[in-house]
Image (tube, grey):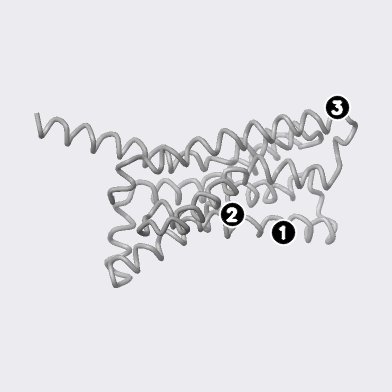
């Protein structure tokens, strides 16, 4: 990984997720208190903050990196991908409602999935494109991809989370309040795992470097 990753970029991105979780829970509690438990607009905002709050902050981080004319990095590409992928669930959510999908039932399990992970899908694709540009060929890019712990963790989350959401709905869970909406989205929003893996990798590399010097 590049010098900037070694300085802890993924550790910086990690803290953004916690802010989104806290914001979603606080807003959900407020809306429930005000009597907007099933407000579609309320759910949209709560899910956006709970599932994509970190994407907004990471997008700001990526823009800041560009404005500072810093060299391109995997973390910046990851942040841009999350920021650009965050509007897809809005379209999916409102289209589903217009089509008559029961957003509180089993059939609506995919809605929190996209709020939680459409940005992760965008980040994964953006990361792969970054590796393609860096390596020069798709073959080399894929070879690097399957060795990159952050990208592999991201892919695992994308594939596993919808199964968990579907099982929860089948077992009777329903986001009938804004707090439940926030909790469901937060549970699906495992976007903190790839940055955590990146941070742990950076920490391990720094410790190994210190040991080698010693």
For the residues bearing labels 2 and 3, Cβ distance under 8 angstroms? no
Q: Secondary structure at mark 2?
A: helix
Spatial distance from mark 1 to mark 2, Cα to Cα?
Answer: 11 Å
Residue 77 vs residue 111: left or right?
A: left
- The part of the image, by quadrant, that contains residue 104 is top right
Q: Which residue is mark 2?
A: 118
Q: Nearer the viewer, residue 108 or 126?
A: 126
- The part of the image, by quadrant, that contains residue 200 is top left
Residue 76 vs residue 102: left or right?
A: left
Q: Which residue is mark 3?
A: 33
Query: In front of the other: label 3 or label 1?
Result: 3
Q: Which residue is mark 1?
A: 92
Q: Position of residue 39 (x, y in %)?
A: 86, 42
Image quadrant where one finds the C terminus: top left
Q: Which mark is residue 65?
A: none
Residue under the image location 89 percent in, 30 percent down:
34
Sequence order check, earlier mark of 2 and 3 = 3
Q: Position of residue 111 (x, y in %)?
A: 70, 50
For the view shown, which residue lies furthest in the right direction? Answer: 35
Spatial distance from mark 2 to mark 3, Cα to Cα?
Answer: 29 Å
């Amino acid at each position: 990984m590049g010098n900037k990753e070694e300085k802890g970029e993924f550790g910086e991105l990690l803290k953004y997720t916690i802010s989104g979780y806290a914001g979603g829970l606080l807003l959900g509690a407020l809306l429930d208190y005000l009597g907007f438990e099933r407000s579609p607009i309320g759910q949209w905002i709560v899910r956006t903050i709970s599932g994509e709050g970190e994407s907004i902050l990471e997008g700001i981080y990526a823009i800041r990196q560009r404005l500072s004319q810093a060299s391109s990095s995997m973390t910046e590409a990851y942040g841009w991908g999350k920021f650009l992928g965050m509007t897809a669930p809005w379209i999916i959510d409102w289209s589903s409602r217009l089509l008559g999908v029961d957003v509180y039932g089993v059939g609506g399990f995919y809605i929190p999935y996209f709020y939680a992970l459409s940005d992760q899908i965008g980040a994964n694709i953006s990361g792969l494109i970054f590796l393609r540009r860096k390596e020069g060929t798709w073959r080399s890019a894929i070879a690097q991809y399957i060795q990159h712990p952050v990208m592999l963790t991201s892919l695992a989350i994308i594939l596993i989370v919808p199964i968990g959401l579907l099982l929860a709905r089948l077992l009777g869970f329903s986001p009938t309040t804004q707090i439940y909406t926030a909790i469901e989205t937060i549970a699906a929003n495992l976007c903190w795992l790839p940055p955590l893996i990146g941070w742990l990798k950076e920490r391990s590399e720094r410790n190994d470097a210190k040991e080698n010097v010693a």
